[in-house]
């Protein structure tokens, strides 16, 4: 027992102190505060070790740290079919929340470990050790696992155990020093100094680790140095009038910083463009390997393509339109020569994510691209640098693999993409949809002619018309802008005379195949939402 009891021996950094059989100890450091100090010692020990582990990861394993590995394992393990969870994972603002939640869980366990270690030597250390092993197990599930990455949680756990033992030793030393004796003040001071020092170092180290991860260890510099070649096949000119020009509408081409971001990557995979290779494997006549220089030397095409997330609700903004520069995937697949019977390409990313895309979509005449450029720049790190897939007509979860490293030619019978066993459909063609962007939500407008504007999309089919109706009245055709191509969204506008009061306004599109948007409201799972975007407009007198 390390909790000094009357008549027992405790440890004092090597010196042994005899505690006399009386109650002085309990009087000068009572149980409540002592428990709180032990908990704080646990939190500081764990915090310092985790921060040290993240910093070490920056050196030896930039794309996989213990924290991101555990977080990634949590993301992958989330039960399928729990819709809110899945939507949260597809959603954009979830990553900070997950990291904060993990930090809270670690802090609670560390606090308990501190209290346990103070009560009974080695019990807290054992808890920390188990935690280190959990970290190793989490890393082992990751696609980027390396021996160095696997060693990190062990090193982290060891550091936490040593720190914990050290701080608890100081605390017990203080507790064991008789009150009012000359030693009490200094043993208390020593413990509090070490505790505060550990906390300060943890805070500084955490700030450094965070900034470092933000810079993604050199990859952003490599991106800055990358010069994109001219497209052999430039993007077709944007037809005049393609932008409806209604104030408050989103731009026809989404600027990179505003482009929605969806992925399961807790930290952006730091894919080094100098060592990046893409392998074409599986049911092929010959396996092909392509490095970045080889890819940049191909005749590249530049195309406007609107990509969308299956989790985009009707009226939502998980959709964006960019000018992508890349090599048509069909050319690469033609080099490999898919074998008869293959019907799917499983694309895999540097961080072990995958998408299953129908082989015919990647080999037909559409411009499915192995993209290196986005709106005239190398891909931003969070949008897949150095190379990603962009496939007109399919939701991102079955096609748009970022940080892509492998194309496995296979079958739907033998393989499945990441989201398919998690409650999402095997196939994910984008559903036609339309959206009202203006007037903006919650902004009352003056009576008279109210200008409406928005977008509509049916990728790889194209939109023929967009209609609006007010208060379930007759549908009226909107002024419809020429599209850039059938693979992008189209803008529309319409001025409508409205009197004072609240009006319900709905939009629907019809595609170039003659099909009109489905009115039935369906949720995003398993294969994309349907229904009419409906807004309420407040018109003032
Ligand atoms: N490596 C990787 N690629 C990925 C994903 C992912 O989780 N990991 N998510 C996909 C999904 S669900 C979508 S909608 C698109 C989003 O691309 P963006 O973030 O560039 O908008 O990326 C796809 N590519
Ligand atoms: Mo998505």
Image: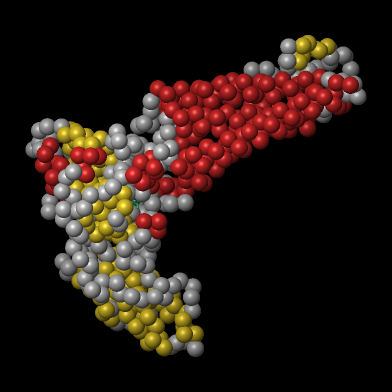
Q: As drawn, is 266 to the left or to the right of 1?
A: left
Outermost residue on the right side: it is 180
**Residue 411 drawn above or below residue 190:** below
Say which of 275 and 111 sits in front. Answer: 275
- Percent of width and height locating residue 65: 46, 32
- Percent of width and height locating residue 83: 41, 49
Q: As drawn, is 126 to the left or to the right of 358?
A: right
Image quarter where the N terminus lies is top right
**Residue 359 drawn above or below residue 474:** above
- Percent of width and height locating residue 449: 39, 86
Say which of 205 and 335 sits in front. Answer: 205
For residue 250, which quarter of the picture? Answer: bottom left
Residue 112 visible from this viewpoint = no
Q: As drawn, is 125 to the left or to the right of 250?
A: right
Residue 336 visible from this viewpoint = yes
For residue 488, which quarter of the picture? Answer: bottom left
How many marks on residues?
0
At x 34% / y 36%, what residue is drawn?
272
For residue 177, which quarter of the picture? Answer: top right
Say which of 147 and 432 sits in front. Answer: 147
Q: How is the image coloured?
A: secondary structure
**Residue 122 drawn above or below residue 456:** above
Q: As drawn, is 422 to the left or to the right of 289?
A: right
- Percent of width and height locating residue 87: 41, 51
At x 37% / y 65%, what residue is drawn?
315
At x 42% / y 80%, what residue is drawn?
503
At x 22% / y 34%, what residue is drawn?
279
């Amino acid at each position: 027992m390390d909790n000094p009891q009357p008549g027992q021996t405790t440890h004092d950094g090597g010196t042994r102190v005899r505690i006399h059989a009386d109650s002085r100890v309990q009087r000068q450091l009572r149980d409540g505060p002592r428990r709180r100090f032990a908990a704080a010692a646990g939190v500081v020990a764990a915090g310092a070790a985790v921060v040290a582990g993240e910093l070490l990861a920056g050196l030896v394993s930039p794309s996989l740290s213990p924290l991101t590995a555990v977080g990634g394992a949590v993301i992958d393990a989330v039960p399928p079919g729990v819709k809110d969870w899945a939507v949260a994972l597809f959603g954009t603002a979830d990553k900070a929340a997950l990291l904060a939640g993990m930090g809270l869980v670690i802090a609670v366990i560390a606090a308990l470990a501190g209290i346990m270690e103070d009560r009974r030597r080695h019990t807290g250390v054992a808890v920390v050790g188990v935690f280190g092993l959990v970290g190793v197990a989490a890393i082992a599930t990751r696609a980027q696992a390396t021996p160095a990455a696997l060693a990190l949680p062990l090193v982290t756990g060891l550091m936490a155990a040593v720190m914990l033992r050290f701080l608890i030793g100081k605390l017990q030393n203080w507790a064991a020093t008789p009150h009012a004796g000359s030693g009490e003040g200094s043993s208390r001071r020593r413990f509090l100094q070490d505790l505060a020092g550990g906390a300060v170092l943890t805070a500084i180290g955490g700030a450094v680790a965070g900034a470092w991860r933000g810079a993604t260890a050199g990859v952003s510099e490599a991106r800055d140095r990358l010069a994109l070649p001219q497209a052999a096949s430039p993007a077709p000119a944007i037809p005049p009038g393609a932008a409806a020009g209604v104030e408050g509408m989103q731009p026809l081409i989404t600027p990179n910083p505003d482009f929605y971001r969806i992925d399961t990557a807790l930290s952006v995979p730091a894919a080094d463009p100098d060592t990046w290779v893409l392998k074409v494997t599986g049911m092929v006549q010959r396996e092909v390997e392509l490095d970045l220089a080889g890819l940049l030397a191909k005749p590249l095409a530049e195309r406007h393509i609107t990509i969308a997330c299956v989790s985009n609700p009707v009226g939502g903004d998980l959709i964006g339109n960019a000018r992508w520069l890349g090599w048509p995937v069909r050319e690469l697949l033609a080099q490999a020569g898919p074998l008869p019977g293959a019907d799917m390409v499983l694309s895999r990313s540097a961080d072990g994510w995958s998408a299953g895309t129908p082989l015919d979509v990647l080999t037909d005449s559409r411009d499915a691209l192995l993209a290196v450029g986005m709106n005239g720049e190398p891909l931003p790190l969070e949008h897949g640098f150095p190379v990603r897939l962009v496939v007109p007509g399919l939701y991102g979860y079955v096609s748009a693999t970022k940080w892509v490293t492998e194309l496995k030619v296979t079958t739907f019978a033998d393989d499945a993409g990441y989201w398919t066993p998690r409650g999402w459909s095997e196939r994910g063609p984008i559903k036609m949809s339309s959206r009202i962007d203006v007037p903006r939500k919650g902004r009352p407008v003056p009576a008279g002619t109210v200008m409406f504007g928005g977008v509509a999309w049916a990728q790889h089919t194209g939109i023929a018309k967009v209609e609006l109706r007010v208060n379930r009245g007759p549908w009226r055709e909107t002024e419809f802008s020429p599209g850039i191509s059938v693979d992008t969204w189209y803008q529309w506008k319409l001025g409508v005379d409205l009197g004072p009061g609240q009006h319900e306004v709905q939009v629907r599109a019809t595609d170039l195949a003659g099909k009109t948007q489905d009115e039935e409201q369906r949720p995003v799972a398993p294969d994309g939402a349907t229904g009419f975007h409906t807004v309420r407009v407040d018109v003032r007198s």
